[in-house]
Image (cartoon, grey):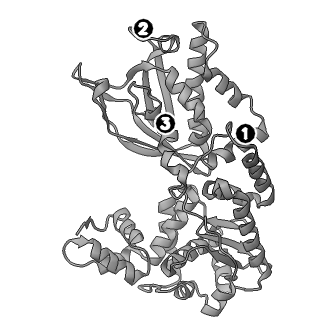
């Protein structure tokens, strides 16, 4: 059975204390695409079973309390609130002393959520979770599964005469929200904030920024932005967009490549799509073993000469919360605002920006950020494979074991960071790196 499912049967509460716990004691099986994420080895019974026994009220309350971030907060490692990301996205933090699997929900934008589950030993609860894996589901599927569990718990408590608990108030607020309130809650969640506990000034800033930025930018802006500097960051982007739109650069080679890429359909695995597009483009451009050791040379791989490239990069204050901004001018030609300082990082950001220009069906401005959205993963994979092709890395590998010094040397040769090289080697299963 595909999708996410919470299957539960009410059981005798035995020695459970507290009305909510006693009323909702159950046998729970959580399945993801037919796999029992709740499969455990029971230490006491010395047996394996697919379900767990626990009260469902704490889990239902945790799901309701974290409803908006669970569905709409992307991973953004550079933000301070990222330190608590797992507490808002991994259900074991809602177990309150009972056994729950290490199952994490990571929204990725584009209506998708990644699910990851890991082996998890809970000797104090007498069980060890036996499954690990990952998949990607639609937000709608996950939302329906969450709602089914919460509604089931609330109905059960109603049958037991329990009608005054925080879960019911929280769920009524979620279900009773109108279209504008839901949109606001999604934005607050994207910022890593509780939409029901925001200072009035911050709420007003969110509303103002939402009204001044191009609507197409918002899904990538809020997950990357700093909640304490929203309006300043938005104004920096607006200034950058105007600077690009006012310049007259005409990068004809990129415009021609964009026509050829018009059929690009981002609907599958973002990493694989980025890799495949890079390989196809390098082949079409007949790049063979050519690599770029500067930002000008990156442009050259796409047929853009240094003078043209510099004309397409206005000298303005770059945004510090994102890697790059891409927009079109009156010539329908792209311009780039690069937020990075180090030359190799600027080259990588430029390459990601070119990919976004080539594959976007809309002329709207686009952001290149560090978030883990489907879009950002796709452009990172493209830039990694375009600038440091896996086929060339295989040719350059030293004989014998590969250590961190070798990685550094490869990074210098391909003019990318060691982090990119390490990921290329790992993701393409080229080599293992031994710490020297």
- Which of 50/418 is in front? 418
Q: Which residue is mark 1?
A: 182
Describe the element under mark 1 as helix, strand or loop: helix
Describe the element under mark 3 as helix, strand or loop: loop
- Which of 215/94 is in front? 94
Residue at 60% over, 91% down = 306
The answer to the question of whether label 2 and label 3 lie on touching residues, with beta carbons closer than 8 A, is: no
Give the answer, above or below, for where 158 lies relative to 186: above
Q: CA distance from mark 1 to mark 2?
A: 38 Å
Q: Which residue is mark 3?
A: 2
Give the answer, above or below, for where 431 lies relative to 105: below
Dot 3 crowding, Cα within 10 Å, few <14, some 14–19, many 20+: few
Residue 307: image x %, image y %? 64, 93
For the C terminus, which image quadrant?
bottom left
Q: Which residue is mark 2?
A: 12
Residue at 46% over, 41% down = 104
**Quarter of the image where one finds residue 426:** bottom left
Q: Closer to the N terminus: mark 2 or mark 3?
A: 3
Give the answer, above or below, for where 346 lies relative to 102: below
Dot 1 crowding, Cα within 10 Å, few <14, some 14–19, many 20+: some
- Whether residue 263 is visible here, answered yes or no, is no
421 lies left or right of 198: left
């Amino acid at each position: 059975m595909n999708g996410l499912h919470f299957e539960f049967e009410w059981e005798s509460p035995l020695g459970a204390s507290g009305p909510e716990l006693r009323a909702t004691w159950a046998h729970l099986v959580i399945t993801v695409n037919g796999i029992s994420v709740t499969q455990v080895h029971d230490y006491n019974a010395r047996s394996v079973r697919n379900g767990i026994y626990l009260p469902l009220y704490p889990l239902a309350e945790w799901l309701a309390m974290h409803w908006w971030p669970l569905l709409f907060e992307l991973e953004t490692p550079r933000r301070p609130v990222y330190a608590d990301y797992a507490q808002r996205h991994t259900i074991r933090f809602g177990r309150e002393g009972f056994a729950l699997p290490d199952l994490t929900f990571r929204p990725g934008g584009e209506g998708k959520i990644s699910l990851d589950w890991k082996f998890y030993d809970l000797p104090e609860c007498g069980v060890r979770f036996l499954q690990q894996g990952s998949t990607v589901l639609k937000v709608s599927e996950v939302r329906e599964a969450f709602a089914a569990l919460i509604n089931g718990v609330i109905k059960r408590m109603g049958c037991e005469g329990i009608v005054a608990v925080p879960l019911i108030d929280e769920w009524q607020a979620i279900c009773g929200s109108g279209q504008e309130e839901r949109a606001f809650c999604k934005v607050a969640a994207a910022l890593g904030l509780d939409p029901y506990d925001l200072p009035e000034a911050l709420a007003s800033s969110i509303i103002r920024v939402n009204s001044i930025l191009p609507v197409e930018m918002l899904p990538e802006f809020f997950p990357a932005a700093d909640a304490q500097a929203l309006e300043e960051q938005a104004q920096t982007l607006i200034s950058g967009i105007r600077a690009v739109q006012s310049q007259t650069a005409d990068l004809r080679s990129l415009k021609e490549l964009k026509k050829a890429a018009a059929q690009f359909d981002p609907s599958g695995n973002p990493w694989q799509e980025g890799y495949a597009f890079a390989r196809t483009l390098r082949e079409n451009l007949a790049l063979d073993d050519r690599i770029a050791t500067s930002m000008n040379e990156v442009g050259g791989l796409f047929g853009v000469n240094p003078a043209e490239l510099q004309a397409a990069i206005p000298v303005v204050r770059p945004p510090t919360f994102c890697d790059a901004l891409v927009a079109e001018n009156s010539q329908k030609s792209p311009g780039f605002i690069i937020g990075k300082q180090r030359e190799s990082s600027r080259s990588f950001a430029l390459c990601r920006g070119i990919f976004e220009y080539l594959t976007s069906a809309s002329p709207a401005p686009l952001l290149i950020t560090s978030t883990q959205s489907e879009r950002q993963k796709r452009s990172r994979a493209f830039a990694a494979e375009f600038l440091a092709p896996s086929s060339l890395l295989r040719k350059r590998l030293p004989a014998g074991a590969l250590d961190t010094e070798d990685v550094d040397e490869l990074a210098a040769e391909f003019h990318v960071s060691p982090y990119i090289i390490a990921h290329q080697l790992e993701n393409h299963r080229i080599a293992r790196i031994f710490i020297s």
